[in-house]
Amino acid sequence: MTSERTQGPGATRVLVTGAAGFIGARLSERLLERGDLVHGFDDINDYYDPTLKQARLGRLQGRDGFGFTKAPLSDRGALEAVFKEFAPQRVVNLAAQAGVRYSLQNPHAYVESNIVGFLNILECCRYHGIEHLVYASSSSVYGANRKLPFSVEDNVDHPVSLYAASKKANELMAHTYSHLYGMPTTGLRFFTVYGPWGRPDMALFLFTRKILAGEPIEVFNHGRHRRDFTYIDDIVEGVIRTLDRPPQGDPAYDPMAPTPATSSAPYRVYNIGNDQPVELLRYIAVLEDCLGKKAEMRMLPLQPGDVPDTHAEVSALQRDTGYAPSTPIEVGVRRFVDWYRDYYGVPPRAAVRGP
């Protein structure tokens, strides 16, 4: 474990798990910029290119106020040591085994990280008196739901992948700890996050690499499904807004008509999405325009575990934090392409492979 240098009197101590990940690295950067002390926790596994994770982490290491521990969430001893030595006041749990499709091939990884690992987080937060735990859920919890937009008031008992089931389990586990121990917890259902330093297994990254390389891209559901693509900085702003507002028990909660979104316990769940779903073919067209190159598309049916459409209803987030994501895809995709070209040394209009 590397130690943090003092950031200043009154600085909030925040533990960020998954700090080498897409969202975790950007969140850590923002927290440091506002003067918080941040300790990152990540196992830097090889689910996707570890050199990209190391590069994200390299932008944080050496900065005042940042420390780091390399370990998986399932390593209870390592996690307990961080809680004891760093003594965080708040925790943001972004570490998880991600990916809907990978959960069909390697389900055990999801139980180890997303269930066992999350239990370790809950127990550490309980015993160390954490003032607020914010954790990543996912729009995938809506599963077989078809009523749009997806609302945090909706029942989400029909997941269509083990990944989604593990995220729903996190919400249930968090509620239990909020109820039993009065521990404030907030779950954030992220909707299709994209932007600079993004994940190579996500569509925008895959499409960009293949289009530049002159390879065909696989377009599932014939490109007709719609996604609530949400820009990374909008996601991070939502995390920070909720982190600064530990929930209390909802005085309006009715046990005779319960809702999944609130509780008599200090527990909340929010959607963080752009509230502007975009058809995949439109998303690809914006990318083609940014790259200055047309895509060769292989049209395929919807994949197992995927859902046809997502659309975040964000009124609860707006009501409680005064914030809602707003970056249009034309802006966000352009920023991603500019970053991609810079990071991989791809000159304009050059058909050069990425990772």
Image: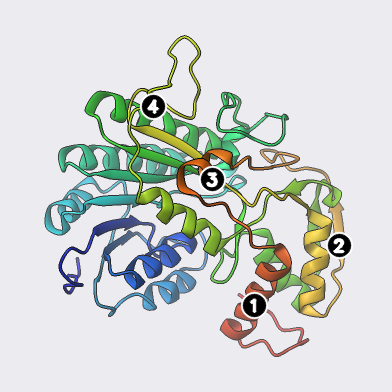
Binning the other alpha carbons within 10 Å of mark 1 as few (below 14), some (14 to 19) or many (20 upward) gives: some
Question: What is the quadrant of the N terminus in the image?
Answer: bottom left
Distance, label 4 to label 2, CA atoms, is 49 Å
Which residue is denoted by mark 2 in the rendering?
297
Q: Amino acid at mark 2?
A: Met
Q: Quadrant of residue 217?
A: bottom right
Q: What's the residue at 86%, 62% (across, down)?
A: 297
- Which comes sooner in the sequence, label 4 or label 3? 4
In the image, residue 259 sits, relative to residue 189, either above or below, namely: above
- Which comes sooner in the sequence, label 4 or label 1? 4
- Which comes sooner in the sequence, label 1 or label 2? 2
Q: Amino acid at mark 4?
A: Asp
Q: What's the residue at 65%, 35% (across, down)?
A: 150
**Could you tell me if residue 113 is visible in this image?**
yes
Report helix, strand or loop for mark 4.
Answer: loop
For this rendering, which residue is in front, 150 or 158? 150
Disc ID at residue 318: 3
Distance, label 4 to label 3, CA atoms, is 17 Å
Distance, label 2 to label 3, CA atoms, is 38 Å
- Which comes sooner in the sequence, label 1 or label 3? 3
